[in-house]
Image: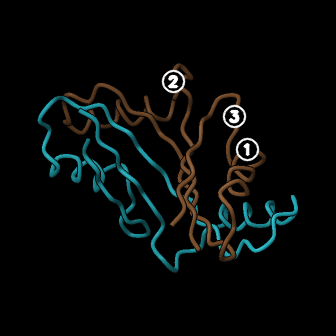
Chain colours: A brown, B cyan
Amino acid sequence: MKARVTVKLKPGVLDPQGRAIRQALETLGFTGVEDVRVGKVIELELAEGTPRATVEDMARRLLANTVIETFEVELA
Amino acid sequence: MKARVTVKLKPGVLDPQGRAIRQALETLGFTGVEDVRVGKVIELELAEGTPRATVEDMARRLLANTVIETFEVELA
């Protein structure tokens, strides 16, 4: 089975990578870009029947830094 | 309006970050993790009415390296 964990910075946490992308897009001539935030997607191939709680545990313990990041788990 | 660009490594492209995560999960006692792939999510706040083609153009020219990465655009 597949699981996808999306990790994003919490609102209010500074995102220098997003800011750099915004400026680069402007330099390339893309106008109207108001904000850019960058996150991670971690796709896991897991043993069949792995419960959501286990994936959430993985996210909390390793994949996300919950002080500054939030995460979302999707199972497929 | 919001747009989300998800950038993933193409299948077959080595993912050392994913491999490191897999090993770390194993070290933490999570068993049955067969594969881990890491990608990026870029969330853009754009001017109302920005066409999908423009976002795809941003992805092709800046956000993804299309030699080794694929991208997906979602508009919201």
Numbered tag placed on residue A66 in the rendering: 3
Q: Nearer the viewer, mark 1 or mark 2?
A: 1
Q: Residue furthest bottom?
A: B12
Residue at which label 2 appears: A11
Nearer to the camera, A50 or A31: A50
Mark 1 or mark 3, which is nearer the start of the sequence?
A: 1
Residue at which label 1 appears: A60
Mark 2 or mark 1, which is nearer the start of the sequence?
A: 2
Residue shown at 65% from the left, 73% from the top: B35
Nearer to the camera, B60 or A56: A56
Residue shown at 34% from the left, 45% from the top: B4
Q: Are marks 3 and 1 in contact (CB under 8 Å)?
A: yes
Identity of the amino acid at label 2?
A: Pro
Q: Residues within 10 Å of mark 2 (few under 14, many from 20)?
A: few
Identity of the amino acid at label 1?
A: Arg
Residue shown at 74% from the left, 63% from the top: B20
Q: CA distance from mark 1 to mark 2?
A: 18 Å
Give the percent coordinates (x, y) of residue A37. Answer: 44, 34
Mark 2 or mark 3, which is nearer the start of the sequence?
A: 2
